[in-house]
Amino acid sequence: MTEELLYYTDYLELDKVLNAQHPKSNNDTDETLFIIIHQAYELWFKMIIHELDHVRRIFDTDNVRDNAGEMSIAVHKLKRIVKIFDVINRQVDILETMTPMDFLEFRDLLVPSSGFQSLQFRIIEAKLGLKMEQRHKANYYKNTRPGGFNQRDYDAITGVEAEATLKGLVIKWAERTPFFDEALWQDFQSKYPLEEGEQKFWSDYKQIYKNSLSGSVELRQFDELEKIFYKEGLGEFSVGAMRAVLFIMMYRNLPIFQQPFDLLTTLIDIDEMLSQFRYKHMLMARRMIGMRSGTGGTSGAGYLEGALRQHYIFKELTEVSTFLVDRSHLPELPNTVKEKTSFNA
């Protein structure tokens, strides 16, 4: 018997994919475009979830080896997510070739379905670390009436929120940063009087940062510095996690910090790509429906604008830039720390 050879159409199951567009209106050209764009979104969302799950598994351990393969794989996959969102965002440009009048020909036939009900997009947000209570108009998400989620999808989102989020796992990873053990800093040459009870580096850094400020407005940031890096932390990031992030960003050129710095900046990139996605959809909603409500019952462009303002997941990382100091003023690290941060340690 001759083995049946694999065929392109069969491998991609194109009979299913290409026959999955069923317009509800007579305007089958524009509605077909609308369907295909949103189906493409969902396929890309599936890939993003796949990559996020892999990265979460890497970080869901007590020892992520920063100078080994795991960190490299995690950063690579997160960068792929950034590229995917770049493609997703550019798809909006294609959708905008449809005019408001074109959309009106089939818009009412979509009620009460809505892009708001994208289960996979909500799962992406939840896996990254956006909690239900942090969402704009959280009550929209907590109903199962028409326009909201069906019970199955609502339960799925709730289940994902109970899992370890990427943000939570990154916080735990940062808290484990091993470079502030006092034994490593015995030879550190302090330039300022040591604050009682404070670690040598952070005692000096506080004074260096204060000296970099000018004017009453900037000096208020010093109060924020003490709150974030010495007392309370910021958002979900503890004092220890915030110190680790700041230290990595300030000394990012040290060999062992290059990939962790890449990780942190890629998480910021993902946040920015999500913001672009929301922003482009807000503008498109204003263009297509003006001040009308969304088909699912939200306030339309108004809801999207609120989500744009509020749904930042890694905003703590972007705020660290407030507390960087000029590289020429960075404290010189003792040899014991330099050895610890080299790949030969």
Image (cartoon, rainbow, N blue to C red):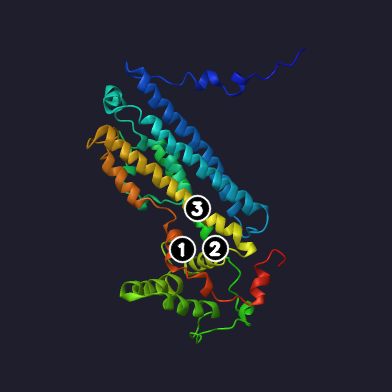
When asked about the image quadrant of residue 258, the answer is bottom right
Say whether disc 2 or disc 3 marks the residue closer to the N-terminus.
2
Residue that carries the numbered disc 3 in the rendered image: 267
Is 292 rendered above or below residue 263?
Answer: above
When asked about the image quadrant of residue 216, the answer is bottom left
Is 247 rendered above or below residue 47?
Answer: below
User: In this view of the protein, which residue sits in the foreground, 187 or 307?
Assistant: 187
Visible residue check, residue 165: no
Q: Which amino acid does label 1 sit on?
A: Phe
Mark 2 and mark 1: Cα distance apart in space = 9 Å
| Helix, strand or loop status at disc 2 | helix
Disc 2 and disc 1 in contact, CB within 8 angstroms: yes
Image quadrant occupied by the C terminus:
bottom right
Q: Which amino acid does label 2 sit on?
A: Ala
Checking the image for residue 174, the label placed there is 2
Furthest residue to the right?
A: 1
Residue that carries the numbered disc 1 in the rendered image: 237
Say whether disc 2 or disc 1 marks the residue closer to the N-terminus.
2
Image quadrant occupied by the N terminus:
top right
User: In this view of the protein, which residue sits in the foreground, 326 or 152?
Assistant: 326
Q: Position of residue 34 (x, y in %)?
A: 38, 27
Q: Position of residue 298 (x, y in %)?
A: 27, 39
Mark 1 and mark 3: Cα distance apart in space = 14 Å
Mark 2 and mark 3: Cα distance apart in space = 14 Å
Furthest residue to the front?
A: 328
- Left or right of 331, for residue 31: left
Q: Residues within 10 Å of mark 1 (few under 14, many from 20)?
A: many
- Please tell me whether mark 1 or mark 3 is closer to you in this view: 3
Say whether disc 1 or disc 3 marks the residue closer to the N-terminus.
1
Q: What residue type is labelled 3?
A: Leu
Checking the image for residue 18, the label placed there is none
| Residue positioned 50% across, 57% down in the render | 168
